[in-house]
Each structure stands twice: as C-alpha cells, then as structure tokens.
Image (spheres, rainbow, N blue to C red):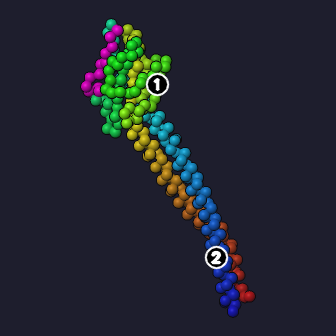
C-alpha cells in the first residue's frame, strides 16, 4: 500500500513537471519563432535596399566611364567606343545591358544599343547621379544617368546605362536566405538551451517529488 501511494504521488508530480517544462519551452520558442518571422520579413526590403545601393554604384561608374568617351568636333558629337570597349561595357552574363547617349540640344540619339524608354526631361545637375526604373517590352531595367557637358564646345548630353534586375534580385534572395538560416539556427540553439535551463530550474520540484514518494501515506 505505501508503495502504491508513492507511485500515485510520483505520477502526478512527474506529469506536472513535464507539463510545466513543455509549456515554458513552447512559449519561449513561439516568441523566438515570431521574432524570427518578423526579422525575415524586415530583411527583404533591407536586403533589396543594400543590393540596389551596391549595383547602382557600379552602374553609375559605367555611366561616368561612358561619358568620358564622348567628344565634340565643331559641335558634332561622337562616341569613341571601339568594339572592345562596347564588349567591356556590356559584359554581364546575367543581365541585358543597354546604353544611350542623347544630344540635349535637339533630343537626338547620338549612340546606343537599345531602347531605355522615355528619357527624363526634368533639369538635373551636371555629373549628378540619377536613377530610374523602366519597363521595356517584357523586361524591367534599372537605369543610371547623368547630364554631361562635352568639351570643347560645351555640348550638353544625357548619358544613360541600364541593366535588367536579375542580379539585384539574386543578391536580395541571398541576403534573405542567409538571414533565414541564421534565425533557424538561433531558434534551434535557443530552444535546446531553454529546454536544459528549464530542467535545471525545475530540479527542486523533482527533489520534492522524490521526497514525497519516499514517505508513507
């Protein structure tokens, strides 16, 4: 009879111990998962902004280099871009790259390899980096452009270089994927630590359980 009483006491205490442990771990893990989901959601626009910043800088560098190849002779514009230079400017295995040079005196295209949509008519500063998004056909392009003045005749031109968005989207996906793996790892490790920590903190309950089980009715 005392053994039966001890067993009956042990079972409720053991069940309470495990139930409390599971409840605490479940709450903590749920909070961590919710925080992780919010982190991943926030990581997407942040990753997109970072990718945009990186590729925009590279794109405007191409604009600046292309602007240096434009010359003027008696007011007649010409672009000194040999075949090797075109291959270098347009070299991108992932993206479609287009460029265009427009004479702002009359709006004529001096040189280019494709359409980049309607060119901006608003006044912009000389050498000032500008960006816009355009849709040409079924493709979306990010276009960097600047207003440039060609010496020695001070001819104003608009220099544009655009590329499709695959690389930017790929980098954004890599950033979000890395964030997701980091959060999954953190939640897993945290859950294991909480499980062990709760077990340690509930050890006095186990001692009470053992003491109660060892006593007679």
- Point out residue 193 in the picture as x, y percentages from the top left corner: 57, 62
Disc 2: CA contacts within 10 A as few (<14), some (14-19) or many (>=20): few
- 92 vs 188: above or below: above
Q: Which of 15/102 is in front?
A: 102
- 103 vs 74: above or below: below
Residue at (52%, 53%) from the top-left corner? 183
- 4 vs 193: above or below: below
Residue at (45%, 43%) from the top-left corner? 172
Residue 101: which numbered mark, if any?
A: none
Q: Is residue 68 visible?
A: no
Instruction: Please provide the residue range marked out in magenta.
Output: 75-86
Query: Residue lying furthest front in this view?
Result: 137
- Point out residue 119 in the picture as x, y percentages from the top left corner: 42, 23
Membership of 79 in magenta stretch: yes
Residue at (32%, 30%) from the top-left corner? 90
Quadrant in the picture for the C terminus? bottom right
Q: Is residue 208 visible?
A: yes
Please give left or right for residue 208 compared with residue 70 in the image.
Answer: right
Please give left or right for residue 177 compared with residue 16 in the image.
Answer: left
Residue 15: which numbered mark, if any?
A: 2
Quarter of the image where one finds residue 89: top left
Residue 129: which numbered mark, if any?
A: 1
């Amino acid at each position: 009879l005392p053994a039966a009483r001890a067993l009956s006491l042990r079972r409720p205490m053991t069940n309470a111990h495990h139930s409390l442990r599971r409840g605490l771990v479940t709450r903590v893990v749920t909070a961590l998962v919710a925080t992780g989901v919010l982190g991943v959601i926030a990581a997407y626009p942040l990753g997109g902004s970072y990718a945009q910043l990186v590729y925009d800088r590279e794109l405007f560098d191409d604009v600046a280099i292309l602007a240096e190849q434009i010359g003027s002779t008696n007011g007649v514009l010409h672009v000194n871009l040999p075949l090797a230079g075109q291959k270098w400017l347009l070299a991108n295995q992932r993206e479609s790259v287009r460029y265009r040079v427009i004479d702002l005196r009359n709006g004529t295209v001096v040189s280019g390899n494709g359409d980049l949509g309607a060119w901006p008519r608003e006044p912009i500063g000389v050498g000032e980096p500008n960006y816009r998004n355009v849709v040409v056909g079924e493709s979306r392009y990010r276009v960097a452009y600047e207003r440039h003045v060609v010496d020695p005749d001070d001819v104003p031109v608009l220099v544009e270089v655009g590329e499709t968005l695959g690389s930017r989207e790929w980098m954004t996906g890599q950033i979000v994927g890395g964030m997701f793996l980091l959060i999954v790892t953190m939640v897993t490790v945290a859950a294991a630590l909480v499980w062990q920590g709760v077990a340690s903190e509930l050890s006095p309950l186990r001692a009470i359980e053992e003491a109660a089980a060892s006593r007679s009715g």
